[in-house]
Image (cartoon, rainbow, N blue to C red):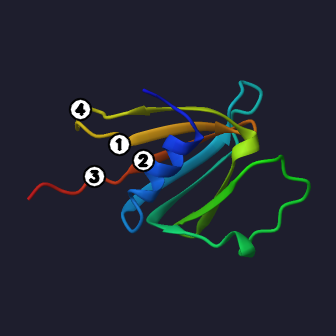
Amino acid sequence: MSMDYDAVIAWLRARLGKQLVVSVQGATEEIRNTSISSAGPLLARDDGDITLIDPPPGRVEPFAIGTATVVLLEGDFAGAQSTDMGTGVNAIVQAEVGGLLITFAEVARPAG
């Protein structure tokens, strides 16, 4: 399902405190072997803790997942897709932001 910036932010805010995995890599074929990933509880960050140099116009939404901070700039947002992986809820969101592909995934809870 296609998502806009507001839908991605709403998806993340609905999961605050839950365990997520985030992966960031280049969105183009030229950048294949560079990535970063982190796992942990999703937390909202204060944008006062973030220093941006010449950011594009628009909102700034920072989140922390584990030890990583992900800053989503509305002016760099190119689009996003989600999938439910058969769970009935959107379990994975992939957003292209500033030439990067950012994947957010819910951590599955063990059955029991």
Give the distance between the C-alpha atoms of the residues marked 2 and 4, in whole angstroms. 14 Å
Give the distance between the C-alpha atoms of the residues marked 2 and 3, in whole angstroms. 9 Å
Tell which circle, 4 or 1, labels the residue nearer the N-terminal end: 4
Mark 3 nearby-residue class (10 Å; few <14, some 14–19, many ≥20): few
SS label for mark 1: loop
**Residue on which disc 1 sits:** 91
Please report contact status of discs 1 and 3: CB closer than 8 Å, yes or no: yes
Give the distance between the C-alpha atoms of the residues marked 1 and 2, in whole angstroms. 6 Å
Give the distance between the C-alpha atoms of the residues marked 4 and 1, in whole angstroms. 9 Å
**Residue on which disc 4 sits:** 86
Which residue lies at the image location 39% right of the left edge and 58% below the top edge? 15
Q: Looking at the picture, which amino acid does disc 3 mark?
A: Ala
Relative image position of residue 65 (x, y in whole percent): 52, 64
Tell which circle, 2 or 4, labels the residue nearer the N-terminal end: 4
Q: Which mark is residue 108?
A: 3
Q: Which mark is residue 105?
A: 2
Tell which circle, 1 or 2, labels the residue nearer the N-terminal end: 1
- Which of discs 4 and 3 lies nearer the camera? The answer is 4
Relative to 30, is 110 on the left or the right? left
Which residue lies at the image location 45% right of the left edge and 58% below the top edge? 13
Which residue lies at the image location 73% right of the left edge and 75% below the top edge? 49
Q: Looking at the picture, which amino acid does disc 4 mark?
A: Gly
Which residue lies at the image location 74% right of the left edge and 33% below the top edge? 31
Q: Looking at the picture, which amino acid does disc 2 mark?
A: Ala
Please report contact status of discs 1 and 2: CB closer than 8 Å, yes or no: yes
Query: From where the camera sits, is residue 103 visible?
Result: no
